[in-house]
Image (cartoon, rainbow, N blue to C red):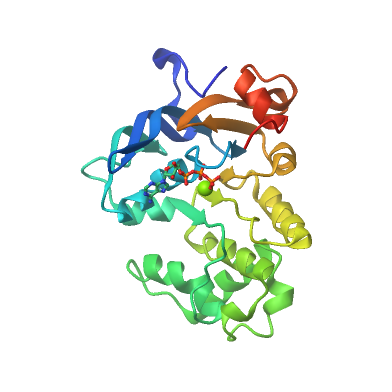
Amino acid sequence: MDSGRQDPGTVEHGDYAIETRGLNLWYGDFQALFDVDLGVKRGIITSMIGPSGCGKTTLLRTCNRIIERLGYVRTTGSVNVLGHDIFGDDVELVQVRKQIGMVFQRPNPLPISIRENVLFGFRLHEARLRRVTAAEEDEVLESSLRQVLLWDTVKDRLDKPATGLSLEEQQKLCIARLLPVKPEVLLMDEPCSALDPAGTEAVEELIWRLRGDYTILIVTHNMAQARRASEECVFMLLGRIVEHGRTEELFLSPEHSETADYIEGRYG
Ligand SMILES: Nc1ncnc2c1ncn2[C@@H]1O[C@H](COP(=O)(O)OP(=O)(O)OP(=O)(O)O)[C@@H](O)[C@H]1O
Ligand SMILES: [Mg+2]
């Protein structure tokens, strides 16, 4: 099935937010990704599914080069983000991380106030370039918290520690703090896995609302979530992409027997 690959002659690189070609990755001697060609289309939600250990987190973390924090990781192949090779010599990691925000499995707010959390990245990126006024910060703070439906809940305790919020609120805050630097892409690694059912529903609803404004690549073990919340779906197995297509098609009539086995719950 179409794995985002096209005849090179007709590829419109602008259609893809993320494009990997022949991507291999090793943790020391262990190869975790094999020849991954992935095209993540702009402006839609793409879900990534597959059994535990198949390489979903690894692939996600390669897309913003956060994986390199582990010194023993080696990659070959290419990863283009918004048309730029992120392994290129001239690439600025700060720029890459600004364009691609990441949300982790467990909410990880900084141990500072709600306000400081939301403004942290904004100050880091904008203050390097120009003077930012307090009024502008207040505006950015409010609009980011409104976008994640958290403003009304926290507006009277903006200076309280973020760690005092519920897990659901913390995860919404972790999404809110990405927005002020206007990323194009949001990578989410099982963002609901630490939440209770109500929290899961609330955060899923929020992710759906962000659709169109951002390109979202989301890893999930929840088939219902993948089906409900994504337009395209990628199925991985043992470090390879087995199938990638429209979510409805992939679930209704998968091309590969491995995909069918997985979505029917026969393993992993
Ligand atoms: N830091 C690491 N060092 C060595 N091997 C690792 C490391 N992280 C992951 N791996 C291995 O790489 C493979 C892919 O792991 P990864 O965490 O990407 O899978 P996953 O699909 O995200 O799994 P899960 O659904 O459980 O989150 C696994 O075999 C895992 O054991
Ligand atoms: Mg994972």
242 to 10, vertically: above or below: below
* x, y percent for residue 17: 48, 37
Q: Quadrant of the C terminus?
A: top right
Instruction: Indicate the quadrant where residue 128 lies.
Output: bottom left
The residue positioned 69% from the left and 44% from the top of the image is: 222
Count of residue discs: 0
Front residue of this view, candidates 190 and 135: 190
Instruction: Give the side of residue 264 with respect to residue 69, left or right.
Output: right
Quadrant where the image shows the N terminus: top right
- Displayed quadrant of residue 28: top left
Q: Position of residue 227 (x, y in %)?
A: 72, 36
Q: Residue at x 68, y 80 (%)?
A: 155
The vertical placement of 45 against 126, above or below, is: above
Q: Residue furthest right?
A: 198
Q: Is residue 235 left or right of residue 58?
A: right
Quadrant holding ligand 1? Answer: top left
Residue at the (56%, 69%) spot, across then down: 140
Give x and y (percent) for residue 139. Answer: 58, 72
What residue is rendered at 33% in x and 32% in y?
78
Which residue occupies the foreground of this view, 262 or 124? 262
Q: Residue furthest front?
A: 267
Closer to the camera in the image, 129 or 16:
16
Q: Quick check: can you spot residue 168?
A: yes
Inspect this view and state whether residue 44 appears.
no
